[in-house]
Amino acid sequence: MTKGEGSLVAKIESPEGNPNQRLCSVLLNEFNYLPWSRAITLALGGRSKLSFINNKSKIPDASSSEYESWLSNDQLVMSWLLNSMEPKLAEIFSYTESSRHLWDAVKDMYGNLNNAARVFQLKKDLAGIQQGNLSFVQHLGNLKAKWNELDMYRPHTTDATILLKRAEEDKIFQLLASLGSEYEDLKSHLLMTPELPSFATVCNSIQREEVRKMVMNVNTSIRGSEARAFAANKSVTSDRTYKGKRPDLKCTHCEGIGRAGIGHIRERCWILHPELKPKFNEEQKIKEAPLREALTSLIQRETSATLLKV
């Protein structure tokens, strides 16, 4: 989410016909389509090439004498656009038929995405930005670059509905920013949804994730306890004077009641001495019972009504 930072002022470079040049100083990535597209339109407008991407340029007939000149210019614009993208994106769009198709394909893929992730990152950066060793002019430049980009995503408005929506979004952003690093996957999922969920929905998602993590931790603890019990039982067994079912060891008590009695002696017989039988699993279940009950209660608890009042 940290990509796309910096100034996006279009640069008019020469010579105009150089296919290897870039149209703006920052390359297109998954998060900066809006400022990138603005910089590209300014750059192409300054070169009188904007008509190649805005559907105002009529494609000549392939048999026309003008077609070769149009194709040359169109491929030049395509080269500029591809050079103004990160390499991985340029590779994706490199086989489009024309600059107009390329422009539309990029817009379809990134132009309709929810910008919440970028707004969240900008607000987080602005809240934590410090001058450090930068001069005041450099520090102010960094701030203005972020302010300007934020204004593009959130233009000034007096619409009460939009302002209320932004106020709720800001609460969501503050909440997500306050979460620990173990919630990074959930934060990314929520911010990249086509429409940012409501505050109540976000709270519910966080609580469900918390419960899931608790359940996973309990399961991990149980597996660890079982492993420790097995190791302890093995250790106890290894300390005995015999290992496994030794045919030379026989229990006279078991033989007397019709059992085989092979592998242990009377002094180690669990029937006569039940206290010798391993109790690790039973003891662990008793210890974990309250936690299991608490988790079950937490999962079943109704939270929506309370969260909606927040």
Image: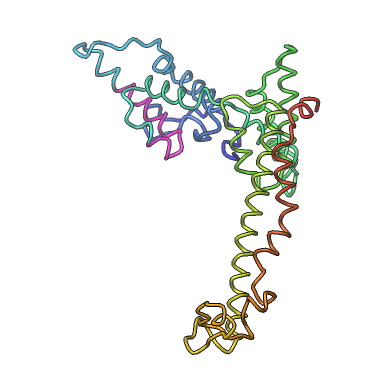
229 displayed left or right of 308: left
Quadrant of the rendered structure where residue 113 is?
Answer: top right
Pick out the residue farthest to the left: 63
Residue occupying the point 40% across, 10% down: 56
Q: How many marks?
A: 0
Residue 248 among magenta residues: no
Quadrant of the rendered structure where residue 93 is?
Answer: top left
The quarter of the rendered structure image containing the C terminus is top right
Across and down, in percent, residue 254 comes to 56, 80
Quadrant of the rendered structure where residue 173 is?
Answer: top right
39, 238: nearer the viewer? 238
96 displayed left or right of 210: left
211 displayed left or right of 96: right
143, 164: nearer the viewer? 164
The quarter of the rendered structure image containing the N terminus is top right
Across and down, in percent, residue 76 comes to 35, 26
Task: Name the colouring of the figure.
Answer: rainbow
Residue occupying the point 72% across, 11% down: 159
Across and down, in percent, residue 303 comes to 75, 32
Tell me which secondary structure the magenta stretch mostly adopts. helix
| Image: magenta residue range | 72-91
Residue occupying the point 53% across, 84% down: 243
162, 100: nearer the viewer? 162
The answer to whether 239 is drawn above or below residue 304 in the figure is below
Across and down, in percent, residue 2 comes to 60, 40
Residue occupying the point 71% across, 39% down: 177
The answer to whether 55 is drawn above or below residue 118 in the figure is above
Residue 81 among magenta residues: yes
